[in-house]
């Protein structure tokens, strides 16, 4: 028997979350497989506040219980996110799996989370006491380690509306469907007046959390593409030195090789 | 298309797709004890003792001391224990079974058992292993002379890994003591009579002391040929002790880690070439049998007989050995030893051709066997060898020769393409004189007063369609509508022994017995009467008798033939290979049902592509198989080879029903050769020697060779 609470509103969900020791449950695509014994769930898939995609001046706001299929059908969701989400598992999983669940599972292999990292997305976390907005990389600390209090829920993913048009996305899975990422890569590039304003690169499934090195990225900010090109060898060298990867279903060496190839390809694609 | 080939709705289609079929785990649990095995946690050790927790009432601990008969499972040899002896020989070996009404309590009790081991040094590595279970030598011609006179001698080693059958339904058996002391054992299985013999021996009873029913079975692929005999004995012994029905169903991790898989292999080929032709092959085939011999003898036999491929080589020497390691015993899996050696010989021929500066296809064509030629075991290819025509069919389907020439040119850029081809046979039916000397199949038809006819045979429906194709044959001969003829899952209490469901034999051998029985019944038919007819296996007259001690004679009466081509594109940044097309021409004789045969061909071909590419399984330094789940052991999906084109080429076998011959195993066998040849070409002509060849392997070559 599954024990749990079903909330009909966000308020109700937060009351339950504060009062009981519960595992938030949105689509259940990970939790059903885990089949933890002796836990109580808080079912969130009927909470209307968590099921919306809205847009404000700055962000596309994706509710935590929005499914991947719903996001794919929404015109406001950036193409980069759609590309990543469209390659998650298979249609049945995408019909149930959610953005909040992908975050909450706390895995560096989560395909939507990679995009949140590269896009500098923020998360809105709510509790009975109020809410806070955190950067995704401050929230996602390590394997199964999240900055989420026991009375908090993930409410929304705040994805910047602008700046995601020029990108690279690659997923290396063990096969073409129903495959957990073995290496995933997302890069976002932007220039203004001939100067690089963004050259974000994020690596998924290769360490305990999604990897991104903003200090290395910063060395190209403000440079022209030609200047960046002249710096490319050292730039790649800096990544190669910093990237200490773990082994998993594939070796650390393989992961690193692929990461460096994909980073190089990303830079090349934008003239660097 | 002949009438018999026209597709019908499978007899078990509706209950299976609607979820109404009853598998062994679906029987109600009331009054049935759940059994869970206590598996060894170390690869090799003396078992000093087991500290069993206090058992609540109604819970039992069952081990070797409870075996009323012989604690040895009858497979080929009898070295596999029902429950472990003084030592355990691999991680997962069953030490005991805990039985009781509540599965959770049973699991807790099982996990609370403390096994005291005196650890011994295990042998894990196939290269290092020297203890032989089986050791065969055969050959013909003058190998030494051919090597002495050769222009050039080639030597290479080839390795293949495990492959897991990955059937949808895990292993599961149930035993129920019946009134009068008879034991009823049923479950997921391929070979009811194998289990019958094994359980008789474990219980120490006569043939009427047990009966075995094959339940609806969710796939076998060979994995349920021998293993259910072991599990059947374990539940039968448990039910005997508990005096209640006992059911043991494996969970997926248990199944993937501890049950039989395809034998990893290490093949060494030494080949003499003179005037551009292969004049001799000296072949050493080494299979990792695992801790007990189970089916390794017969798997190895099939493997070494195929070792020279489908090429006419005048001088052959083959040595085959199956060695013991402290790992899970390997067993049957679709292809049965042949995928390993066909992979090796196809790569060998490809590599020699490249060294000689000729195209691999042309080189292979120049060596093809043909009707009347001598087989590797000095038998004869009695029937036409349709390979040349099949090569043309494949060439036409995918423009093979043109692409092969095109992709041989230097390639640049991220994505590189290659195409490869393999050609091979699958010997139809049991190896050697097994059908005549060991199986002696008997099949019956029983006609009831209402005019319905029941097929009585022991072959199991495992998805290959026997519940449909057997009745199709009988209905055809009796000129009855198909719904008047039926074939239920076999129960050894009421069907004769028509042999096991293995070796792609059921349709060809037993189907023919049924065809003859149907003719007999037609001749005797009397309306309104119950009638029964019987047919027994008769060895075809044309066969050259096979002697297993010398490996001489016809190893198979006939062969199913195939040509495969695989075209792929490699991403040089990630090593990932995208299969652009997989093309197979398959000659299984007359298809008894076109859709069923095509389903077999497509599924088997895809399984072979998995074996060649992504299906990697290995053990760690302690001998433990780590990738024991479907997220760690990946099999291909339909998305991986969307362009999968299978074609049938019909070369009829006069002694099979309407010209049918063995089908089930053929489509898996040749994929690794074609796949690796394509990878080699895409990587600019590198030499590759092992399968599976994963993205990681590919990227390692790209990095090393700076491609």
Image (cartoon, coloured by chain):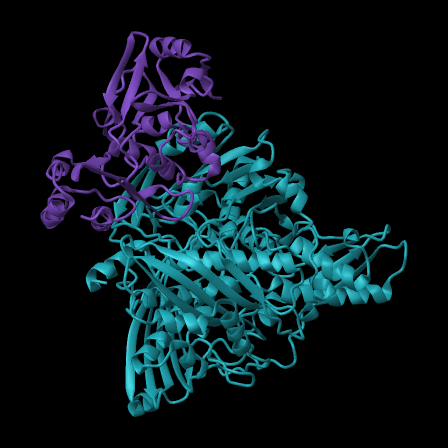
In this view, the residue in front, A25 or A171, is A171
Residue at the far front in the pictured view? A193
Image location of residue B271, percent across then percent down? 33, 81
Give the side of residue B502 with respect to residue B42, left or right: right
Q: How many marks are shown on the rendered structure?
A: 0
Answer with the quarter of the image where residue B648 lies.
bottom right
Give the side of residue A222 with respect to residue B352, left or right: left
- The answer to whether residue B134 shows anywhere in this view is yes
Image location of residue B514, percent across then percent down? 72, 63
Q: Is residue A96 above or below residue B684?
A: above
Q: Is residue B627 above or below residue A106?
A: below
Give the side of residue B627 with respect to residue B478, left or right: left
- The answer to whether residue B346 shows anywhere in this view is no
Q: Which chain is cyan?
A: B
Answer with the quarter of the image where residue B338 lies.
bottom left
In this view, the residue in front, B519 or B187, is B519
Residue drawn at (63%, 43%) of the image: B16
Image location of residue B189, percent across then percent down? 56, 50
Residue drawn at (19%, 42%) of the image: A245
Residue at the far right in the pictured view? B527
Give the side of residue A21 with respect to residue B421, left or right: left
Image location of residue B145, percent across then percent down? 33, 91
Residue drawn at (27%, 49%) of the image: B620
Residue drawn at (27%, 28%) of the image: A144
Chain A is shown in which shade? purple
């Amino acid at each position: 028997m599954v024990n749990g609470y079903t909330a009909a509103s966000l308020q109700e969900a937060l009351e339950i979350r504060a009062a009981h020791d519960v595992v938030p449950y949105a689509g259940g695509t990970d939790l059903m497989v885990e089949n933890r014994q002796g836990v109580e769930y808080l079912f969130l898939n009927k909470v209307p506040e968590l099921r919306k995609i809205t847009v404000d001046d700055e962000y596309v706001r994706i509710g935590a219980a929005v499914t991947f299929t719903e996001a794919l059908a929404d015109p406001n969701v950036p193409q980069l996110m759609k590309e990543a989400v469209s390659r998650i598992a298979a249609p049945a999983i995408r019909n149930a799996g959610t953005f909040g669940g992908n975050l909450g599972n706390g895995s560096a292999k989560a395909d939507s989370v990679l995009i949140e990292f590269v896009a500098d997305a923020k998360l809105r976390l709510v509790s009975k006491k109020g809410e806070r907005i955190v950067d995704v990389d401050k929230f996602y600390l390590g394997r199964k380690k999240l900055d989420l209090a026991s009375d908090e829920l993930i409410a929304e993913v705040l994805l910047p509306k602008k700046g995601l048009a020029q990108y690279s996305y690659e997923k290396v899975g063990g096969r073409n469907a129903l495959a957990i990422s073995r290496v995933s890569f997302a890069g976002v590039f932007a220039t203004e007046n001939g100067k690089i304003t963004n050259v974000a690169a994020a690596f998924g499934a290769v360490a305990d959390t999604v990897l991104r090195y903003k200090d290395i990225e910063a060395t190209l900010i403000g440079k022209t593409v030609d200047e960046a090109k002249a710096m490319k060898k050292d730039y790649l060298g800096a990544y190669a030195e910093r990237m200490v990867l773990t082994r998993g279903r594939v070796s650390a060496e393989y992961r690193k090789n692929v990461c460096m190839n994909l980073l190089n390809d990303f830079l090349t694609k934008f003239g660097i | 298309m002949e009438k018999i080939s026209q597709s019908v709705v499978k007899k078990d289609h509706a209950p299976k797709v609607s979820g109404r079929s009853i598998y062994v785990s679906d029987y109600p649990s009331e009054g049935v004890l759940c059994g869970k095995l206590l598996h060894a946690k170390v690869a090799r050790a003396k078992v000093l003792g087991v500290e069993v927790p206090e058992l609540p009432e109604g819970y039992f601990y069952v081990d070797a001391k409870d075996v009323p008969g012989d604690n040895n499972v009858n497979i080929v040899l009898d070295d596999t224990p029902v429950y472990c002896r003084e030592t355990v020989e691999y991680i997962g070996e069953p030490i005991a079974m805990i039985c009781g009404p509540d599965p959770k309590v049973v699991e807790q009790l099982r996990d609370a058992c403390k096994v005291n081991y005196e650890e011994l040094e295990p042998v894990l590595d196939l290269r290092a292993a020297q203890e032989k279970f089986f050791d065969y030598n055969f050959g013909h011609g003058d190998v030494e002379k051919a090597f002495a006179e050769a222009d050039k001698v080639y030597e290479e080693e080839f390795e293949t890994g495990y492959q897991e059958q990955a059937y949808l339904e895990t292993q599961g058996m149930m035993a129920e003591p019946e009134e009068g002391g008879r034991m009823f054992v049923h479950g997921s299985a391929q070979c009811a009579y194998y289990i019958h013999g094994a359980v008789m021996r474990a219980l120490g009873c006569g043939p009427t002391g047990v009966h075995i029913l094959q339940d609806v079975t969710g796939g076998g692929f060979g994995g349920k040929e021998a293993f259910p005999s072991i599990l059947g004995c374990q539940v039968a012994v448990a039910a005997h002790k508990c005096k209640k029905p006992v059911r043991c169903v494996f969970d997926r991790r248990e199944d993937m880690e501890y049950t039989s898989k395809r034998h990893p292999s290490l093949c060494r080929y030494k080949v003499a070439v003179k005037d551009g032709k292969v004049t001799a092959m000296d072949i050493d085939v080494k299979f990792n049998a695992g801790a007990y011999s189970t089916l390794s003898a017969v798997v190895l036999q099939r493997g070494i007989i195929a070792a020279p491929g489908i090429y006419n080589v005048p001088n052959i020497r083959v040595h085959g050995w199956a060695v013991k390691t402290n790992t899970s015993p390997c067993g049957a899996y679709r292809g049965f030893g042949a995928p390993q050696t066909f992979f090796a010989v196809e790569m060998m021929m490809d590599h020699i051709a490249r060294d000689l500066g000729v195209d691999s296809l042309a080189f292979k064509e120049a060596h093809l066997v043909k009707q009347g030629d001598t087989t590797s075991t000095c038998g004869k290819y009695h029937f036409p060898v349709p390979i040349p025509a099949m090569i043309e069919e494949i060439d036409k389907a995918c423009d093979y020769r043109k692409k092969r020439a095109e992709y041989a040119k230097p390639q640049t850029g991220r994505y590189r393409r290659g195409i490869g081809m393999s050609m091979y046979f699958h010997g139809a039916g049991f190896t050697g004189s097994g059908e005549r000397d060991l199986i002696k199949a008997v099949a019956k038809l029983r006609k009831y007063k209402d005019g319905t006819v029941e097929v009585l045979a022991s072959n199991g429906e495992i998805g290959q369609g026997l519940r449909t194709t057997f009745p199709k044959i009988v209905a055809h001969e009796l000129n009855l509508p198909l719904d008047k003829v039926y074939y239920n899952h076999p129960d050894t209490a009421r069907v004769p022994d028509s042999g096991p469901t293995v070796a792609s034999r059921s349709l060809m051998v037993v189907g023919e017995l049924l065809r003859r029985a149907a003719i007999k019944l037609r001749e005797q038919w009397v309306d309104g009467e119950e009638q029964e007819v019987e047919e027994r296996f008769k060895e075809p007259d044309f066969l050259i008798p096979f002697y297993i001690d010398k490996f001489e004679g016809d190893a198979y009466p006939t062969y199913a033939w195939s040509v495969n081509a695989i075209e792929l594109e490699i991403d040089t940044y990630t090593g990932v290979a995208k299969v652009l097309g997989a093309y197979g021409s398959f000659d299984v004789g007359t298809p008894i049902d076109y859709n069923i045969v095509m389903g077999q061909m497509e599924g088997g071909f895809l399984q072979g592509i998995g074996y060649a590419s992504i299906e990697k399984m290995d053990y760690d330094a302690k001998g433990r198989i780590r990738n024991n789940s479907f997220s760690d052991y990946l099999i291909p999906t339909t998305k991986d080879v969307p362009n999968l084109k299978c074609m049938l080429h019909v070369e009829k076998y006069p002694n099979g029903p309407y010209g049918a011959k063995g089908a089930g195993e053929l489509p898996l066998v040749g994929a690794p050769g074609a796949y690796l040849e394509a990878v080699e070409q895409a990587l600019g002509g590198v030499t590759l020697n092992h399968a599976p060849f994963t993205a990681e392997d590919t990227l390692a070559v790209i990095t090393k060779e700076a491609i």
